[in-house]
Amino acid sequence: MRKILLTAAALLALAGSAHAASTITGADLLVDQAKLAGQEVMIDANKIFGADNSGAIVHLGSVTAKILWQDADPQTMRWILTRCGRDGDGCTGHISLYVTPTGKNWGSWPALIKVRAAQ
């Protein structure tokens, strides 16, 4: 019985590590947008600002993207709306988030959905 439990635990650990999201840059997002569509990735934002009903704007180095609230984690959405709104300078620093690129643009910016804080 113990051998079966250890095997099950090992399989669960492997399954969890196989789904680890890769960290991408803004350049990766822009260049590989079609390839990344539908895949969860981690981004390290320099700035998030302009948060409103439709989403928020995020700077990833020299690339700007649009976070849409579709399937967003409620706590992450609340944090961004409260701190990175239209008033003030927005949120600056290194803000790590998991997002899913849609493969489409919002205006000229790559669109990101399913945002959640990286912990």
Image (cartoon, rainbow, N blue to C red):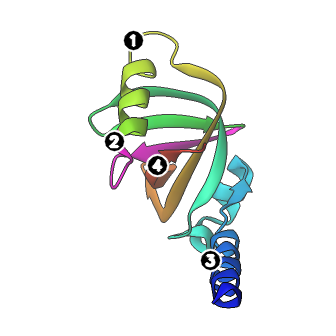
SS for dot 2: helix
Q: Cα distance, mark 3 to mark 4?
A: 24 Å
- Seen at 44% across and 19% down, the residue is 83
SS for dot 3: helix
Q: Cα distance, mark 1 to mark 3?
A: 45 Å
Mark in the foreground, 3 or 2: 3
Q: Amino acid at mark 1?
A: Asp
Give the residue number, with chain letter if any, for mark 2.
74
Q: Amino acid at mark 3?
A: Leu
Q: Amino acid at mark 4?
A: Val
SS for dot 1: loop
Give the residue number, with chain letter if any, for mark 3.
12
Task: Tell me: residue 46, above or below residue 111.
Answer: above
Residue 21: percent from the left, percent from the top?
Answer: 65, 62
Using the image, tell me which numbered label, if any, was put on residue 115. 4
Task: Tell me: residue 39, above or below residue 117.
Answer: below
